[in-house]
Image (cartoon, grey):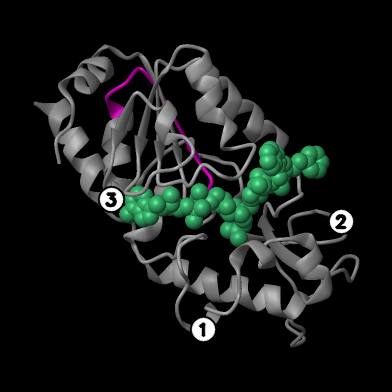
């Protein structure tokens, strides 16, 4: 993997670096991405069709079980070299902001701090009716379980399609994007908004835009540097170049 010398120069001169990650960053840990072919038990379901309030209203048991399966999968996997390299990258800049669309918490598990989670976290649960976080509920065998306060259905604390992103997180992410010198978009298809708008906003404010992804995306043509390869290979290499 060749890392362009101009990119290393840009990064060495940068004061503020912002990173946006997507499902591709966790792919090498064994967490399936959303838009690549799914295999196994859930192969016949489209993630985009399960991650909606409509799907939950129509078939709450199916959606709860899909998330229960994913929650277990995430608990069983380990962060990979891409997650680890981002911890080291953060230490190299006076200001560094990691923004993730991932709900798996793998960045935090390996030691990344102040991570902005735009799409929530799969380990948390909330009430579908009241939108409040619920940490304990009696096990009466219901699937999904019910809110101990109002009896509403419980759901994962993640952001589904047609739902608003958490306001504070989106605000912080926007600020970090429009004020950075270098913006890295890593392992995301750049299809899902408003997250996909962040690199564009960064670029319009003069940031150098870098994409790391083995496949082209709608962002590729706009990026100044495209590092085409798996994040678990490219990021450690990038960090190695910054060290020397
Ligand atoms: C590797 C790799 C390796 C593989 N290394 N890379 C503007 C224009 C058009 C549409 C809209 C718009 N604004 C809003 C919309 C509608 C909609 C949307 O964007 N639709 C588009 C799909 C058309 N957006 C929304 O509905 C959002 N809400 C909203 O806008 O609300 C407005 C509102 C305001 C006020 C009141 C009410 C409403 C919400 C979006 C929520 C997205 N939620 C999900 C599910 C989260 C929970 C869960 O995990 O189940 O988030 S969907 C799913 O997509 C998930 C992801 O975070 C997100 C992004 O996916 P990601 O991470 O990019 O994954 P993939 O699979 O797409 O791509 C993986 C990439 O990795 C690929 O490129 C691979 O090549 C690469 N890769 N291996 C590096 N080893």
Q: Which residue is mark 1?
A: 41
Read off the magenta span. 91-102
Mark sitting on residue 230? 3
Q: Quadrant of residue 54?
A: bottom right
Q: Secondary structure at mark 3?
A: loop
In the displayed orientation, state which residue is furthest to the front.
Answer: 221
| Residue labelled with disc 2 | 130
Q: Is mark 2 within 8 Å of ligand 1?
A: no
User: Does residue 46 lie above or below 205 as drawn?
Assistant: below
Residue 66: give x, y in percent of width and height: 61, 74
Between discs 1 and 3, the one toward the N terminus: 1
Q: CA distance from mark 1 to mark 3?
A: 25 Å
For label 3, the crowd category at 10 Å Cα-Cα, with few meaning under 14, some 14 to 19 and many 20 or more, is some
Circle 1 Cα neighbour tier, 10 Å, few/some/many (<14 / 14–19 / ≥20): few
Residue in the image at 53% along x and 25% along y: 200
Who comes first in sequence, dot 2 or dot 3?
2
Q: Residue furthest bottom?
A: 141
Task: Residue lying at the far right in this picture: please name it.
Answer: 150
Residue at the (37%, 59%) spot, across then down: 27
The answer to whether the residue bearing label 3 lies less than 8 angstroms from the nearest atom of ligand 1 is yes
Say if residue 138 shows up in the picture: no
In this orientation, which residue lies closer to the viewer: 242 or 201? 201
Question: Horizontal placement of 145 versus 100: left or right?
Answer: right
Residue 172 in magenta stretch: no
| Magenta-colored stretch includes residue 95 | yes
Q: CA distance from mark 2 to mark 3?
A: 40 Å
């Amino acid at each position: 993997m060749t890392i362009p010398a101009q990119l290393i120069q840009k990064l060495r001169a940068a004061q503020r670096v912002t990173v946006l990650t997507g499902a591709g960053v966790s792919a090498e840990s064994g967490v399936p991405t959303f838009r690549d072919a799914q295999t196994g038990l859930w192969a016949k379901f489209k993630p985009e069709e399960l991650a909606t309030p409509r799907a939950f209203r129509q078939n709450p048991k199916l959606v709860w079980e899909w998330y229960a399966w994913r929650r277990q999968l995430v608990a069983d996997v380990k962060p990979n070299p891409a997650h680890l390299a981002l911890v080291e990258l953060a230490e190299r800049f006076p200001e560094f902001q990691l923004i993730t669309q991932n709900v798996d918490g793998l960045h935090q598990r390996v030691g990344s701090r102040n991570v902005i989670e735009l799409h929530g976290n799969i380990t948390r649960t909330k009430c579908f009716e009241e939108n409040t976080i619920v940490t304990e509920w009696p096990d009466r065998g219901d699937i999904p379980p019910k809110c101990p306060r109002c009896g509403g259905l419980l759901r994962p604390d993640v952001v589904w399609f047609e739902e608003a992103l958490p306001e504070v997180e989106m605000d912080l992410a926007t600020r970090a994007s429009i004020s950075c010198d270098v913006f890295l978009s890593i392992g995301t298809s750049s299809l899902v908004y408003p997250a996909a708008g962040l690199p564009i906003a960064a670029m319009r404010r003069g940031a150098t835009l870098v994409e790391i992804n083995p496949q082209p995306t709608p962002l590729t043509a706009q990026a100044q540097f495209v590092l085409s390869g798996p994040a678990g290979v490219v990021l450690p290499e990038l960090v190695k170049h910054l060290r020397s």
